[in-house]
Amino acid sequence: MSKAVVYRLDSALPPEDRRQTPRGWTELFFEGIKKGIAADRLAFLSQFPLEFLQRRRFCAGKQISDQAVQLSWNIAAGASPKGTLDCVSAWLTDFRNDLKKIDVPTLVVHGDADRILPLAATGKRTQEFCER
């Protein structure tokens, strides 16, 4: 392999202080997500895209459409219930040692409007670990 692209590898680097991210999310926040999924996964998934996609914010001058939110729900609802629950823990998994093994030029792609795993806490630090 001569090149690599790391796309939305938000979870590659959890916040340095696992008790709180730069935006104030704590481990309790992620535990709340897991509890919501465990209690009623489909109901939780109907609300999560509103936060994750920042439905109330504007992207490139356009609000995210209802259809985009519905598509997100459709995809998530079709996922494994266990996988849906387990992926939340992955957001706090530390992949620094894995990133250090990348030995080819790497492009890290991460948006700057992610409120769950912000760019400063994850994306920018991911790039630092991939620099060779």
Image (cartoon, helix red, strand yellow):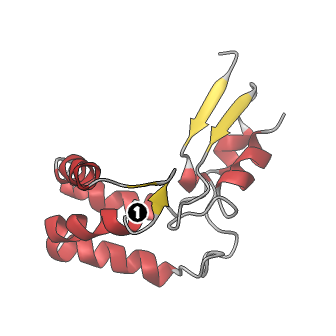
* Image side of residue 40 versus residue 129, left or right: left
Q: Which image quadrant for residue 14?
A: bottom right
Residue name at image x 64 percent, y 26 percent: 4
Q: Residue at image x 66%, y 75%?
A: 22
Please tell me whether residue 119 is drawn above or below residue 29 in the rendered image: above
In front of the other: 128 or 110? 110
Horizontal side of 47 relative to 109 (left or right) equals left
Check disc 1 and give the amino acid type. Phe
Element class at badge 1: helix
Where is mark 1, residue-wise? 52
User: Is 38 situated left or right of 6 in this image?
Assistant: left
Q: Nearer the viewer, residue 9 or 49?
A: 49
Is residue 111 in view from this perspective? yes
Between 37 and 97, the one nearer to me in the picture: 37
Q: Residues within 10 Å of mark 1 (few under 14, many from 20)?
A: some
Quadrant showing the N terminus: top right
> Please, which residue is most extreme toward the top here?
2
Q: Is residue 4 above or below residue 33?
A: above
Please indicate whether residue 42 sits to the left or right of residue 105 in the image.
Answer: left
Q: Residue at x 26, y 70 (%)?
A: 47
